[in-house]
Every structure is written in C-alpha cells, then in structure tokens.
Amino acid sequence: MLRDSEKFNQDIKPNSAFLNELKEKLPEFFTKNGNFDLDKFRDELKEKNINELSEGYQLNFIGKDYARRQAGEMPTSVIVPDEEQNNGEGRNSKNLFFTGDNLEVLRHLQSAYANKVDVIYIDPPYNTGQDDFAYPDNFEYTDDQLENMFGLDENQLARLKSIQGKSSHSAWLTFMYPRLQLSKHLLKQDGVIFISIDDNEDGNLKEICDEIFGESNFLAQVVWERAYAPINLKKNFSPSHDYMLVYGRDANIIETNGISRSDESDSRYNNPDNDPRGPWSSSDISVGPAIQENIYPVTTPSGRVVEPPAGRSWRLSQKAFRERLADNRIWFGADGNGVPRMKRFKSELRKTGITPMTIWKYQEVGHSQEATQYLQSLMGGKKYFAYPKPVKLIQRAIQLYSNENSVIMDFFAGSATTAEAVMQQNIEDGGNRKFIMVQLPEKTYETNDDGTPKLDKHGDYIPTKGGKAAYEDGYKSIDQISRERIRRAAEKIKEDNGLTLPENFDGSFKHYRVVKPTKKTLENIDDFDPNNINLFTNMIEGFSSDSLNIPGNASGEQTVLTTWLAQDGYSFDTNIQDVKFNDYTAHMVDNRLYLIAEGWSADETKELLNQLGTHQLDLQSVVIFGYSFNIAELRELENGLKQLDSKVNLIKRY
C-alpha cells in the first residue's frame, strides 16, 4: 500500500500525469513498452492535414515542474473511516465529508470518482498577502532527489525551495496547479467547475485553467457583486466584486439549465390576439446603428406608414419582415396602429430557463455581509469565518449545471456553504443530489514546526489570530466547524419545511479522515522483511484510529479496506460481504477477495481452495495485505491458486 505508492512515486516525472491521460485517449500512439511514438503521431497529423501551431503562450512559474509531478503521484496516506459518525447519524447518508489535505484526497478519489462529478465549486485562498495563504509543502525529498527529478542546478534548486512558506504568485500557482489537474479527471464530460477568486490571482488562475482544461473549454468569467456599499477608508477604489471562473470538461456538449423563470418573468407573456401558439411577449425590431438596406417604410393594418427612428434601421430585412408578417409574428398593437414589434412565444423559449448573464447582482445571489450575518446566526451568534459565501451564490452554480441526481464537490469546503446549497436546492426542486466536501483540519490554535501545540506561560493552548472564538467554543480545527454547520443547516431546513420535507431528504454525511501513518508505523514498514518465517509486529494495528491518534473508533483493518476500495475504483457506499474461512474473516466485493488481518494459515488456504473448486466462490482476484503474511503462508496460497482450473490473480500489496 504505502510502500507500493512510494516506489511508484520515485519514478514519476513532471509529464507522467499528462502521458497517462494521453495513453487513455490515444493508446494507438504508445508502444508495448509504454513509450509515446512521436513519429507515428506526426505522420497521422500530416495525413489529416493538420497544421502545427507555431505561436502560443504558456504560463511558467517557479515550481511548475514540481506541481506537474505532484499531479501524477500516488497518495501516501490512508483513508480512516469515522465509524462513530458512519454507523450513527450518517449511516444512511450518500454524502461524503473528508478531513485532510485536499491534494491527498483528490489522489485517493482518482479511481472511484473519475468522470462522476457534475459540478465542482471551490473557494481557494485568494493570496491577498493578508495571511490567507502560505505555500504548505515541505518538499519531502532530499536536495539530491529534487535535483535529479527535475535536472536542477544549485541556483534553480534554491529558487524552487524559496517558495516554502511564502505567498508569492509562484507559490500560489504551485499549490493550485496539481489540485486543478486532479479535479479535472473527476468531472464528467459535461461537468463544470466554478472557481471563486479576486483580482490578486485572477489573471494567473485564468492562464493555468486554460492550460489544464483547455482554452476552448472556458465558459465564462462571472462577476459577483459581493458588496453594496463602498469602504470609504480605501485610498483609491473600494472593491465591490469577486470573480468566478467557469470551465467545462468538454464545452462542445455542455449546455446550461438556465436560471429558473420567476412568476414575474412569466407574467410578461400573454395572448391578446388569441394566437393558437399560446402566450407571447413582444420586442422592438429597430436597431442602431442603422443598416442602410434595412431602412424601409412599413404600413400598419390601420394604414399608417412608419419608418425606423432616426439613426436606426429595422432589425429584419424586407424579405424576413414579410415572412414574419405572413406568419402572424408581427404585432402592431391592439388597435393595429402601433410601431411594429416582434412576437416571441413562450412555448418556443429554451425549455431550460433563462440564459445566465456574467454579472450576478447581490440582489439575486446575496452579498458578503449577508452571508456573514446568516452564518453567525446559524452558528449561535459567533463569527468563525471572515468571508463566507452566500448559499444562494453557490446554489445558482448548482442550478445551472446539475440535475436531480448530480454529485457536487467542494475541496476547499471552509464553512461548508456548498453542502447547505446542495441540500437547499434538493428541497426546492425535489432533487437527490449528493455532495463531497473536503477540508483541511486547520488548527484554531498555534502549533510548533513539529505539529505540537504552542503553550502560553500557564500551559494553555494559544488560539490563532482568527480562531479564538472557535477555539473558545470547543472547535479545535476548521473541519469540526464545517461539519457542525452542515448539521445545523440540515436542522434548519427540516424546521423550515416541516411536514413538506421530502422523505428522501439527506441532511447528513459519512465522514473519513485522510492521514499520514505515524513515524513508528513507517519505521515498521521500512524494517519489514517479507522473507521472514515469523511475523514480529502486528502491522495492521498501526492503521487504527487509536494508533493514528484520531477519533472515530476505526480498526486498522477497516482503514486498509477503505483505502483499498477507493484505490480499486469502488465508491464509499459499495456493498461489502464478509466471508468466513474457519475463524478468519475476509471481505469480498464483486469478484475480489480482500485478506487483510493476520491469522491466515494452511487451513484457511485449504478452505479457500475448496470453496473455489466447488464453485461456492467465484473470484477473479485475491488481494492480500503483505505485512500480515509470512513467506510460508504466502507461498502456500500462491501455489494453491496456481493449481486451480480457473485463473485467480493474487495481488500482493505493501
């Protein structure tokens, strides 16, 4: 598991993630050795008469190769289920909440959730220089390793390492690049990502999104009017907006649902002439500046002759006007004496609603102060977050590009506004959308470099600058507040809807923590010798909640199984069947059997082979936790499976 990932990561190159994606899309251009056949690709381009571009612009920054490499690495952490939450209030929930580094979580989800997410919304750190961002990676490689990985000299290595703990543009881009790269793979082909940002990194974000998602998949740069009054203390301008960059996985097949039509907009449609095509509204057919050939006289039914206003012309040519007149699509008013207008029928409008514009007014989607006040009220009057987003803002994004069964993801969950927006939208349209939230367990108290708490002279924890209120209320990390907000928002929705609450309303979540193993466990992994006849260390215990020093009451076996199922492409609600071999409990999903616990012996191998031989079990693979097997047990199992008539693969993981 972890040892396998580390070996894999040692061979990763900056372009490994790109080549893997290319291999998936264009396997015919790769040799049997896995090398890209550039000559064959060039020949194909020539045959198709495709011109190679000689111009273009690409954003470069310190750390770009490192960021590209990160996007191709395997996770070096484990997924620990919160058994208390998942067997309690979250037992029947399809929603997911991950506590951990979002880069590691995104790596874990690459198999199970590839091409399954409909909408991603993220509100990453804006990098304003006001302590909202500092590059967190400590480069878990030696200087020699970094130099060899990227072909760096001493000066270049120094530049790369200079971004540690910094808030420079290069540091921010190095942080964002692999996360966006991995998130792209989770989106469906018609999936869409919304990214909130301000002026500090807006331009840079646009460049890396063009590179990752493709310029042709840029959908919009939405301007959100987040403030309704100026801050007069500002020296020059008082910012009143933020942006949301919107990209699709494949813009060619993406179409917005539109904004739901309000009763007010519906009231504009009527049918004063009893047109059999139903209600309609009319619009002006003059346009400016004037097009000379479209300036012509029109005779109304009453006999009056009218022409376009000065400096304007008709929108339609004379031929087009006559065609629409014959089709009863020109309206001259009830008395037949008015200036001609075009009839637009409600039945012919896009069934999906009103096409959204790129400026979102605070009257429609809320403003920053309103969001802050609402969250304070929801959380008992305490202000835990400085700039939460309004529920209606994210709900608008969900409305535009999701259906009733969509999966919505936010891997910078923060105050978990996105989760509430999903629940609220489900209430409004009867949907059954699911959310996936990811939040770093950022401490509300100050810590030392080794992660231990800083203490004041009385031996008490020292709250962070912005975390004092949360710490005093018992929240030791941001993710705790996020989960509590979801619970309170769900309760409010239940109270507000009372007896009209849908039976299938999902107001909870399953919770998982993504954590690195302890130093002791890593040392045991390094010291493990699979050739030993006897096992001296219970390796599985090192992955339990207790050993990892986190709550949740998960056993090491549950942690390993959860981690493996995600790696093998199974969702977190996969049906797991326990299978007994004497006193040993294995776990089966589809045609795959997982042997994780210690205690497997020759008797269990004999029983497994018997069940396979008599067709009580139908397996394609047996996956074993290598640390739980000594060399004798392993060879016996391996030889036994080879003797079967039907082929069963033995997969050993370390």
Image (cartoon, rainbow, N blue to C red):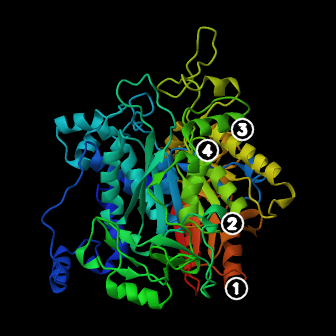
- Residue visible at 47% across and 77% down in the picture: 342
**Residue 615 numbered mark, or none:** 1
Vertical placement of residue 165 versus 399, above or below: above
Instruction: Name the residue that disc number 3 marks.
Output: 378
Q: Residues within 10 Å of mark 4 (few under 14, many from 20)?
A: many
Q: Amino acid at mark 3?
A: Leu
Q: Amino acid at mark 2?
A: Gly
Residue 384 x %, y %: 62, 31
Q: CA distance from mark 4 to mark 2?
A: 41 Å
Q: CA distance from mark 1 to mark 3?
A: 57 Å
Q: Quadrant of residue 145?
A: top left
Residue 411 x %, y %: 52, 50
Instruction: Name the residue that disc number 4 marks.
Output: 542
Residue farthest toward the left in the current orientation of the protein:
54
Which of marks 3 and 1 precedes in the sequence?
3
Q: Amino acid at mark 1?
A: His
Residue 548 x %, y %: 62, 40
Q: Are marks 3 and 4 in contact (CB under 8 Å)?
A: no
Q: Amino acid at mark 4?
A: Gly
Question: Closer to us: mark 3 or mark 4?
Answer: 3
Q: Are marks 2 and 3 in contact (CB under 8 Å)?
A: no
Q: Quadrant of residue 633?
A: bottom right
Q: Quadrant of residue 156?
A: top left
Please state if 279 lies on the left or on the right of 87 as rendered: left
Q: Are marks 1 and 4 in contact (CB under 8 Å)?
A: no
